[in-house]
Image: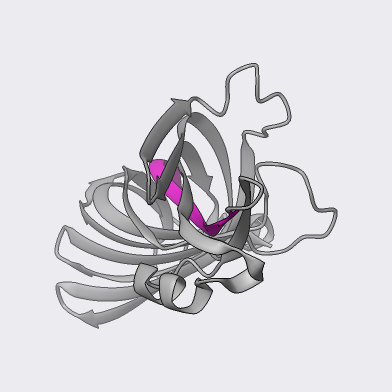
Amino acid sequence: MILAMATMAQTADAQWSINPEVGINVSKFNKSTPKIGSKLGAAVIYGFENSSFAIQSGLYHVQRFSSSTTLSAIYEYPESDYKITIPIDPSESLFDIERNGFYNYSGRFIGYKKTARKEKTNYLQLPILARFNYQAAQDASLYVAFGPYLAYALTGKLTYEEEVRTNHSFEYMETYGNPYQKEYQNRKRMDWGILLRGGMEIKEFTLGLEYEISFFHPIPVKKSITPEYQTFSVLFGYKFFTR
């Protein structure tokens, strides 16, 4: 669609502009807790004279985060020295766990086990957007843009934290590694999705608001296409014009 619209306008005079940008984002993977990251890079805009339509692309470094936590109550059976763990809601307080779990499951509550998984991924992102501009004032304009993007995972960090606390002891263990090393051979680096963007420009200064939906799961466990990552970004930039 974008290429067809560009072909129709090829007889018009065009103007290139480059817009370096830097900003922050908030990313959320499925049901994980939203996390703050960063996004920086430069947009390349191909605009047509006497037309509100333009093509916008560019190259960006994007950080995304995901995390999950599981919590289990530990019960023991004094007669046999046997222990079991029962998964519980991570949002429940330890006071509630002890109050509601005491002598539950025919055992005695003695503590809990908490496991946290955290992941950070650095992507190189290439958006391909159709853009529409509106001149709001002499030195100010508004715009909206939408289209697909492609991204490639450059590096990442995966961290596991395990905490076991009982009436008798406390244990803590942390392990970490790069999820894109050889031991994670089923981990995929490519990502794609849809990007919606809006913003304003005052003279050469720019403000952009972005919403991204990723449809690619880093571990191919699903055959259907469903939203995975959702990312909201705020970007500030300065625009350079060339012809």
Quadrant in which the C terminus is drawn = top left
Residue 85 visible to the viewer? yes
Using residue 95 as the reference point, say whether residue 72 is left or right of it: right
Front residue of 80/6: it is 80
- Can you say whether 181 is above or below 59 in the image? above
Query: x and y percent of residue 76 in the render?
Result: 57, 54
Front residue of 166/144: it is 166
Query: x and y percent of residue 13 in the render?
Result: 43, 55
Render colour scheme: one colour
- Can you say whether 30 is above or below 57 in the image? below
Q: Is residue 59 magenta?
A: yes
Front residue of 227/20: it is 227
Residue located 49% across and 28% down the image:
154
Magenta: predominant secondary structure element?
strand
- Can you say whether 209 is above or below 173 in the image? below
Q: Which residues are magenta?
A: 57-77
Q: Is residue 6 magenta?
A: no
